[in-house]
Every structure is written in C-alpha cells, then in structure tokens.
C-alpha cells in the first residue's frame, strides 16, 4: 500500500487573511458578472460595479506581484490550496473550466475596463450558430493587459468530433467488454467513474460527482439508478447494472462477491434510518447537555463552576443556532429571563449575553424566525416576542434578516419582517441598513428605504440622496418617498436639485409634490426660485404644489399665471399651466379666507 500522504500544514494567519480576501474578490466578481450582463453596453452601472470589483482585486493581490489562480473542474486553488467551496467559487471554476482555462494570473496592471472584459468571459455561453468549440477558440484570442490566461492543451479542439468525445457514455468496444466483465458492483462503478473523470464537459463533471457519491455510500443505489444518463451508454452497460441490482434483491447465498456488493452500496431505506438515528442521537445528547447546564446555572457552586457552566451553555446555544432551532432557543431565552428576574449568576449573565450575540445568530435562525413571525401585526404578542428574542440574539441578526427579507414573497409577511427590522435598528442603529443600500437588487433597496423611512431619522437623507441616481426607476421613486417621510431642509434641497436635473418629468413632479407636503420653512420660496429654469411639465407641477403652500408670497406668484396671456390667446399654449395656477390660487384664497374667519 502507498504510504499515507502528509497532511497539509496549517495556514498562517496572514495566509488565511489573504485567502479570505481572494474569496471575497471571487464572490464579488461572479455576482458582478451576472449583474453587468443585464445592462446594455455603456450603461453607467457597469462602470460602478467593475470599479467595486477592481478594488477587491487590488486588495486580494495586496503587496504580492500577482494573484495566480489554478482552475480545476469545480475548484479554485491558490498556492496549491483549494479555496473554501461556495456557490461563487464553483461557478468561477466551472465557467473557466468550460472555456478550457487552466490558470488565470491577475496583476495590479489589470484596468477596470480589462476586468469588465474578463467578467463578460465568465457569463459567455454557446449561442445559436456558435458551438462550445467556437466559443473556446474565440476565448483563446482574448487579450487583457495585466491578466495572463493559461489554457489546457487538451481543450484546444479543431472540430466537433472532439467536443462530442467530452460527453459521458462514449465507450469503445474494448471498454464495454471490460466494464461488463466486472465481477463486483463497486468495480463496475469505479471503472465508469475513472473513464468519466477524463472528460471535460459539465455533464461529465456532474456524472463524476454522482458516481463518487454512490461509491462513498452518500447516495443510495436507487438514486444512482434514477439519475444515471443511461441513454448515453451502450445498452450492455445498463444490462450489466440491472444484473447487479437483481443479485442485490434476490440474494440466495453469501460469498465474497455478494458481501462486497452489499457492503459497498447503501439503500434509500438505510439512508433514511441512518439520518433518523443521527438526528435522534444528536437531539438526545443536546437535550441531556442542556438539562445538565441549566441545573448548574440554577444552583452554581463555588467561583469557577458558574464561569465554566456559562461557556458550556453558550456552546450549546450556538449549536441550536446553527441548526436553526428557534423553538428551543425561545425556551432557553425564557429560562434566562427567569434566572435574571431571580437575581442569579450576577455578572456571569452579562458574559453569557455577549457570547450569545457573538455565536448564536445564523441564517437558519433568521429563516425560522421569519417563518414563525409570518404576517403577525406589529401590536400583537407574537410580534413583541419576536422583537425581544431577536434583540437578545444581537445586531448580527439584522443582516441575516435582511437577507431573509429578500426571499419572502408574501406581502403581509414581508411587511411584518420589515417592521421587525425597524424595531431592531431602533435598538442597534441603522448601520446595517446603510450598508444594504449598495445591494445590486433594486427591490431589496426599496425594502431597505422603507425601513429607513420608518426609523424617521432626518440625518439619513445624506446617505439615501445619492440613490436618486439609481438606475432603476422603482428605487428612485422609493428614495423620493423616503425623503418625504424623513423631512428636513436637506430633503428639500435634494429633491429640488433632483427636479432641476435632466430626469423623467413624472419623477420630477413627484419630487416637487413631495417638497410641498414636507411643510418645511422656506420650501415654497425655493420652489418659486427654481421655477424659471425648469421644463414646462415640471413648472405645472410646481404651480400645483404651491396651492398646498398658501401664503401671500405664493398667492402673488401664482396670481399672474392664472390669467390668460396674449401668447395663450394667440397660440393656444399654456392652458394646462393656467388651469393649474387658477386651481392653486382658488385653494390659497380659500385657505386664507378660512384663517380670517377663524380669527
């Protein structure tokens, strides 16, 4: 037998830090590539996204001369160490592997434009009239300054025949005879796996994962039978597999071959039993440990025991959090409240609260809490309990619940979750919300703007006003409405500046209307000052808005506009403006008359 390979050395803190920076860069690169593909060439949003990804690239390169990344089928390696598997790293590796790229070496000379060109490669796919072979050839002609792309030689194909050979199931007659002569099921599956591993298509990679999982007893033999692409194989391969399956089901005598076949595979029913047993054992062990920890916390002995009990109990709460066990955590929360009311543990409760905030919050808890909250009204008892529970878990719950908000489709449930986030941000601050304004999903930005407007902090206008230039109209509308709720001089100035810019008339009129509803001192004067420089449609909006801001100044302003001018009599123009001015003047005079009678 071959000697055991030595385990890889533990990464130094510096190496871990750089690896984390690389993984962050790749995550942003893949997400950014998907996003920029949605915009037309030349859109301003493309440059913003590419610049943000470029900054992360420079951080990943650091003080080193370059960033070499080796590409496997579904893995990315840096310095021969695989990066932490994630949806983004797998997508990055799969995309480059499909294009025949074995290594990509980034340097700090890569410009923002060059990075955008590389992002387009990540989302490139064969199209009508262009095969994978054509795409691979086209990619080999791409040149990006500061980026070295190294291709896998076996991928350099010259015709469709090679591309066909990369698909699973194409066996020579010699291979078919060898495979059908395998005496045990694991030998048969192992031969299929080794033959398939040499192929390079996505279908082949998925098949290799399936065969490897079955050989590792992680996938049931029934699932393997169902998921195998039998149509790609010669019928003799399927016949041999069926013979193995019949032998498993109709076992009459035990010998070495039958034992190997039975022990090397796992049935679906056995997998279910194993999962149930593991779950039961884990649940029983956790329950027993919690009981012991609670008993010590209730009646601690000496000085050291409470400290160790707190650490042990916090670890158990962390396990509940990672499993998303909200019901169990609610019970433990009630237990700790009772300890606090009884005056037990003293300063140790403060230490436990810190450990809870650091370790218990998790995506599973956020998902389960959102599901449990449902469409609860903000004044209801379930909502109050959810707020108190989330406050106990701490500020880390806010970004997790924001991520959960992205997935909630029911309107009433989404509003309840948003109200929960409002309550949490009143306790912990608006920092996580401001960070979420940079989200690439416009709908998420709209939700966050509503939460910020509910908080009602006028100083927030400074953070949200740049989003008046957001590429999506729904987001711009949400910003205007949020400013209407936040109020303040800064909101008035931002909205008027927006109306004076080259924007959609409907959005400019909404901004003007919002200013008229703010009831801010000097707002009417600012609208009248902006009036001459604005387009006709927006002037109509201002005149209409001034009707809600009655004063001698606004009366004197709209009065002349309400009269029919010679130009209008001659050309028929300005009718809409005069009608708006007449209506506003009537509204102002009626309001002033009402004030006079009241006095």
Image (tube, rainbow, N blue to C red):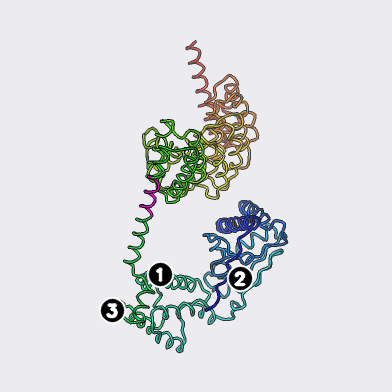
First in sequence: mark 1 or mark 3?
1
Q: Is residue 127 above or below residue 45?
A: below
In this rendered view, identify the residue nearer to me: 133 or 555. 133
Q: CA distance from mark 1 to mark 3?
A: 20 Å
- Tell me, yes or no, if residue 307 can be seen here: yes
Rendering coords of residue 3 (x, y %): 55, 75
Is residue 289 located in the magenta-colored stretch of the structure?
yes
**Which residue was labeled with disc 3?**
251
**Secondary structure state at the residue bearing disc 1:** loop
> To which quarter of the image does residue 532 belong?
top right
Residue placed furthest toward the front? 302
Prevailing SS of the magenta stretch: helix
Q: Which of the two marks, 1 or 2, is nearer to us in this view?
A: 1
Mark 3 closeness class: few <14, some 14–19, many ≥20 residues within 10 Å: few
Residue 101 circle label: 2
**Which residue was labeled with disc 1?**
217
**Secondary structure state at the residue bearing disc 3:** loop
Q: CA distance from mark 2 to mark 3?
A: 48 Å
In this rendered view, identify the residue nearer to me: 441 or 203. 203
**Secondary structure state at the residue bearing disc 2:** strand
Residue 244 vs residue 490: left or right? left
> To which quarter of the image does residue 561 belong?
top right
Rendering coords of residue 505 (x, y %): 56, 40
First in sequence: mark 1 or mark 2?
2
Mark 2 closeness class: few <14, some 14–19, many ≥20 residues within 10 Å: many
In this rendered view, identify the residue nearer to me: 237 or 261. 261
Q: Count up the numbered dots.
A: 3
Residue 214 vs residue 156: left or right? left
In this rendered view, identify the residue nearer to me: 471 or 391. 391
Query: In the rendered structure, which segment of residues is drawn in magenta?
Result: 282-291
First in sequence: mark 2 or mark 3?
2
């Amino acid at each position: 037998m071959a000697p055991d390979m030595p385990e890889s050395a533990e990464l130094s803190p510096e190496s871990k830090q750089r690896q984390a920076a690389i993984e962050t860069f790749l995550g942003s690169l893949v997400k950014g590539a998907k996003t920029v593909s949605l915009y037309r060439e030349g859109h301003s949003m493309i440059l913003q996204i590419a610049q943000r990804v470029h900054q992360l690239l420079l951080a990943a390169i650091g003080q080193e001369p370059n960033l070499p990344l080796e590409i496997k089928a579904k893995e990315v390696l840096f310095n021969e160490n695989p990066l932490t598997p994630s949806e983004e790293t797998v997508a990055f590796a799969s995309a480059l592997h499909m294009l025949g790229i074995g290594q990509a070496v980034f340097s700090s000379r890569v410009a923002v434009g060059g990075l955008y060109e590389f992002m387009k490669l990540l989302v490139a796919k064969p199209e009508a009239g262009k095969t994978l072979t054509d795409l691979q050839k086209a990619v080999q002609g791409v040149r990006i300054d500061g980026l070295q792309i190294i291709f896998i030689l076996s991928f350099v194909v010259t015709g469709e025949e090679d591309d066909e050979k990369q698909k699973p199931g194409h066996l020579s007659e010699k291979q078919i005879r060898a495979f059908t002569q395998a005496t045990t099921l694991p030998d048969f599956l192992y031969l299929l796996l080794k033959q398939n591993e040499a192929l390079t298509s996505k279908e082949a990679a998925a098949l290799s994962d399936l065969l490897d999982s079955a050989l590792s007893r992680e996938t049931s033999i029934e699932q393997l039978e169902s998921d195998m692409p039998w149509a790609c194989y010669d019928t003799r391969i399927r016949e041999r597999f069926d013979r193995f399956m019949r032998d498993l089901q109709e076992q009459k005598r035990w010998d070495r071959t039958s034992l190997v076949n039975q022990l090397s595979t796992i049935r679906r029913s056995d997998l279910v039993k194993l999962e149930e047993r593991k779950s039961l054992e884990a649940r029983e062990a956790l329950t027993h440990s919690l009981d012991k920890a609670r008993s010590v916390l209730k009646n601690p002995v000496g000085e050291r025991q409470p400290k160790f009990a707190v650490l042990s109990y916090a670890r158990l709460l962390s396990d509940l959090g990672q499993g998303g066990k909200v019901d169990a955590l609610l019970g433990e929360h009630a237990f700790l409240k009772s300890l606090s009311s009884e005056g037990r543990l003293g300063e140790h409760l403060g230490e436990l609260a810190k450990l809870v905030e650091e370790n218990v919050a998790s995506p599973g808890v956020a998902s389960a809490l959102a599901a449990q909250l449902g469409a609860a009204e903000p004044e209801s008892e379930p909502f109050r309990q959810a707020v108190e529970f989330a406050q106990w878990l701490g500020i880390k719950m806010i970004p997790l619940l924001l991520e959960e908000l992205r997935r909630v489709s029911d309107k009433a449930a989404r509003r309840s979750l948003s109200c929960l986030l409002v309550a949490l941000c009143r306790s912990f601050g608006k920092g996580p919300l401001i960070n979420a304004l940079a989200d690439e999903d416009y709908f998420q930005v709209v939700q966050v703007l509503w939460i910020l407007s509910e908080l009602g902090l006028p100083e927030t206008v400074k953070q949200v006003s740049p989003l008046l230039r957001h590429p999506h109209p729904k987001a711009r509308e949400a910003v205007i409405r949020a400013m209407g709720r936040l109020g303040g001089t800064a909101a008035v100035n931002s909205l008027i500046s927006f109306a004076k810019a080259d924007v959609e008339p409907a959005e400019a009129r909404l901004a003007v209307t919002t200013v008229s509803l703010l009831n801010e001192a000097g707002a009417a004067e600012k609208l009248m000052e902006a009036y001459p420089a604005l387009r006709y449609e927006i002037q109509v909006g201002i005149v209409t808005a001034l009707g809600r801001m009655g004063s001698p100044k606004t009366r004197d302003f709209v009065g002349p506009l309400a009269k029919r001018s010679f130009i209008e009599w001659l050309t028929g123009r300005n009718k809409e403006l005069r009608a708006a001015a007449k209506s506003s003047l009537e509204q102002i005079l009626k309001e002033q008359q009402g004030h006079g009678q009241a006095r």
